[in-house]
Image: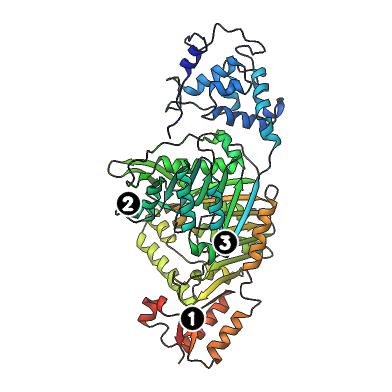
Amino acid sequence: MKNTVIRIAAIMLMLGFSVSCNLEPETVDFTAQDGRDEVGASAGKSDGPFSDCELQQILSWVNDQQSTYERLVSAGIHKRAATHIAAYRAGSDEYLGTADDQLFATIQALDTVPYVGPVAFRQMAAHVAPLCQNTSWETEVIFSPQAYNESHLARVTALIDGAQHSVDVAIYSFRDNGVFEALQNATARGVSVRVLFESAHKDKNDPEGTMSAKLEDTGADVRYVNKIMHHKFAIIDGPRLSSLEALSGILITGSGNWSHSAGTRFDENTVIINGHQEALLRYQQEFNLLWNYSRDLVWNNSLEWFASATISDDMIVNDPNFDALFTSNNFEIKHSATYGPTFTIVNGMNTVSDRLVELIWSANHSIKVASGHLRSRPVSQAILERRQADPMLEIVVYLDGQEYISESGHNKQTQKVEQCIQDAGDSESKQQSCMNKGFLFSYLLQEAGVDLRYKYYSYRWHYSYAEQMHNKYMILDDTTVVSGSYNLSDNAEHNTMENIAIYRFNGFPELVSSFVQNLNSIWVTGETEGLYAALMDNIQNGTSNTFPIVFDPMALNWDEVTALKAAIRAYCPDINSEDYRKNPQDHRVCERN
């Protein structure tokens, strides 16, 4: 699909206007218009006749690539104003949809355009007024694990089945046949599908038979970026070509990949938002950035790449109850003569972790974390400092069992960091690198008195049987939820493309309440069933020849995990043998001694 290109001068000639150096129409008698230099909006928004929302929506509308001269006039904007707005947007080449297009950075910049005065502003305000009156949107949250038919995978399939014109996907892992068939059916009925796919990075070397190639065979365009694509979001019928489509578009985002395990085994969350303007525009802006600087899979040569329309920050109307941040902000874009567009880290940028630390310090009553990992030094230190500063503050942290580390293991990793720093000498960059190397912080948190539990399901972790705690969310004061693809680690901040969305209760009451309820539920996993006591009794007092070392998930604190691991070692002499270590997938039970 080609970008829309419109010749402003040609339109004016077609309408009988003569084109002078300032593009001012000379032969048409306009009524109810503005003088050339009349002021339409005062410098101070609060002092003018228009609301903040109306002014923001006006700016978003006139900056939209679809806001051509004809559309401005058909919306009721007088022709002199429409002509000069369109001419300004088109830039010096007089074409809209080209590299020299200009955006209005502020409402005052729009006000300086000739013949855009109080009449034009009233007309524009009347056009966007419904957008300020209708602030409703729909949200839905699906928590995993679920039966497949109730999972986020089934819901994503249904939403793609309803797509009318476009689907944009940014995904780390994608193996679900139901979603694949939905995308295949979508392209067959003429829906434009674009996929930023982490696996394409590897699949490019030998595409045949891969999911990337299968997607391209359906007509979906698949590309990749040079950094890890860890997003898990999709935009259906969103603002790909026009910002106004955000009002009816659908955003799917969260922690869940498109795999059977994510839907039916792991603890995940998937948020679906329909018609929230800022959310759709923020995520479309992120997708467009990555797409415009992506690399081609090179498989289906009939697919034609096209650049995305520009969505500037000035086009996005801010909702005080929503925000979204992306680690792409930590990178600058360069061009490699060999490889093409390349995202390169900017030293000192910590876009997401800085905001998380800020939110942690903003909490008044409680901080609740549900995360597969906790390896971010800034976030962990902020939690520890909050615990020390305010012992009465409720802090609960729920992690995957991978994050457990023994006291001796913690001492070893601490010594390793200290030695690394010593070896780094006076190099601050090397010292910082030492501090950010996969340090596990759970031992320090529980030692500091943080109420911490692990989702524990096996003595030794292996992906084939892991029932992971794969959520990535934080709840502040039970009124603010932060959720997305972002793992709490330096790797997520500086090596991968990630997102977080921030939802506040005033705008998303049901969504926030759902996350609070979910944490309350997973926090006591296996507790009602008495799984821990039963497993310990089986290990220590059982009469069978074997006992499980892969078991039903339980929410256990550090002391309980330590005791369980000690019991398994005591009654399973082979547990640390070379075979058990190298091939954990082959050993789900152990012969007792």
For badge 3, the amino acid type reads: Asn
Give the residue displayed 46% in from the left and 55% down from the top. Answer: 492
Q: Residues within 10 Å of mark 3 (few under 14, many from 20)?
A: few
The mark closer to the camera, 1 or 2, is 2
For badge 1, the amino acid type reads: Ile
Q: At numbered mark 3, what does the secondary structure look like: helix, strand or loop? A: helix
| In this view, 128 is above or below 348 | above
- Check if mark 1's residue and mark 2's residue have beta carbons within 8 Å: no
Q: Which residue is mark 2?
A: 204
Calculate the distance from the C-alpha at mark 1 to the C-alpha at mark 2: 39 Å
| In this view, 234 is above or below 22 | below
Q: Which residue is mark 3?
A: 149
| Label of residue 549 in the image | 1
Front residue of 142 and 58: 142
Which of the two discs, 1 and 2, labels the residue nearer the N terminus? 2
The mark closer to the camera, 3 or 1, is 3
Q: Position of residue 141 (x, y in %)?
A: 62, 55
